[in-house]
Image: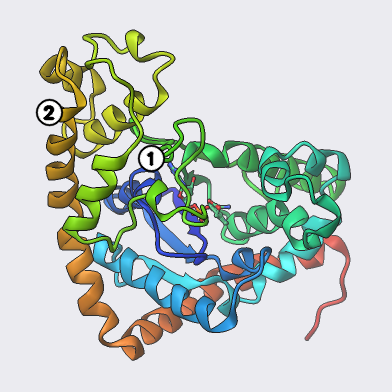
Amino acid sequence: MARIFSGIQPSGIPTLGNYLGAIRNWVALQEGHECIWCVVDLHAITVWQEPAALARQTREMAAVLLACGIDPGRHILFAQSHVRAHAQLAWIFNCVARLGWLNRMTQFKDKAGKDREAVSTGLYVYPNLMAADILAYHATQVPVGDDQRQHLELANDIAQKFNHDYGTEFFPPIEPLILGPAARVMSLRDGSKKMSKSDSSDQSRINMNDDADTIALKIRRAKTDAEPLPDTLAALEGRPEARNLVGIYAALTSGDPALVLREYAGKGFGVFKPALTEVLIAALAPIARETERLLADPAEIDATLRRGAERAAAIADPIVAEAERLVGFLPPR
Ligand code: AMP
Ligand code: TRP
């Protein structure tokens, strides 16, 4: 059975983009696969996180994942910092990955912006840690949103170079799973930017804990154009905001944007936005309610994460120990 791994940063409340691009697919993949889901707090601190906020957000992220249907009984849910193997393997990968490879990472360029001298070195080697997350479990399938494609290519390059340099086949190839009509959900304020939990404008995103009124308001204010919806997907080219809203509606209904256009062609946003709002509230309200219920018992969430970490370490520790042996480290015991 293929082993699946994916991660999400506890850098804020997860957004509709996280849900449609990742979490919802994770839940579906739990049928018929062995899955490992990780709240990646080591990745989160590559940019500054207030310590109290990080702890709270890590719990909130776990609660949202559980509320969405992540099953910590049949699968594994844990916090990255609880399993030492991630940082240990990441160090080895820091010595395998080449500077030139990291220089090509578009996410680093985006996040570092103009002030490159001032960002943490962790942000730069972030993709090496991500490769370690996956390869510490010999996971072969990784469901992510479209923005992570380049990082997974790098993870494969690292695995290949490790295997080549140490004359082994130890690390398997990784296959990205980029699924659905909403693998890239865009900002509600700017159709050229992805929806992100760290965007400074709360109006740019739907948070997984937004209540019905907040969702309605954000959709009403979402940027659009003056044209009615067209009858073909091709005609949405050049209308990124309209295309984004149609994609969201499709992801929450049939999955097919063409069907959405069949229903709404010729209609304006005065009609489409209320319909979208209704679909969003129906999907998100039960998740928000369940998240709230789970957060009432933080000790139970922490216990779930600790149990997950024990099971994760039982898989990762021997794999990383073997990688260390291949590198030539003396056995520690
Ligand atoms: P992050 O919030 O960066 O930790 O991302 C967690 C997961 O959500 C990754 O698989 C991302 O690719 C996915 N994701 C994040 N933002 C979006 C978005 N706007 N649209 C689709 N997927 C996303
Ligand atoms: N970098 C991913 C993101 O921001 C999160 C992540 C960390 C991840 N480690 C991972 C995703 C391993 C998949 C597999 O979206």
Regarding mark 1 in the picture, which secondary structure is present there? loop
Q: Which mark is residue 45?
A: none
From the viewer's side, name the closer residue of 143 and 166: 143
Does 268 sit left or right of 314 as displayed? Answer: left
Does 91 sit left or right of 227 as displayed? Answer: right
Which residue is most to the bottom? 299
The 10 Å Cα crowd at callout 1, few under 14, some 14 to 19, many 20 or more, is many
* Residue at mark 2: 271
User: Which amino acid lies under the numbered mark 2 shown in the image of this protein?
Assistant: Val
Residue 275 in the image, given as x and y percentages of width and height:
12, 36
The 10 Å Cα crowd at callout 2, few under 14, some 14 to 19, many 20 or more, is few
The image quadrant of residue 107 is top right
User: Which amino acid lies under the numbered mark 1 shown in the image of this protein?
Assistant: Leu
> 185 above or below 217?
above
Numbered circles on residues, count: 2
Label 2, label 1: how many angstroms apart (C-alpha)? 17 Å
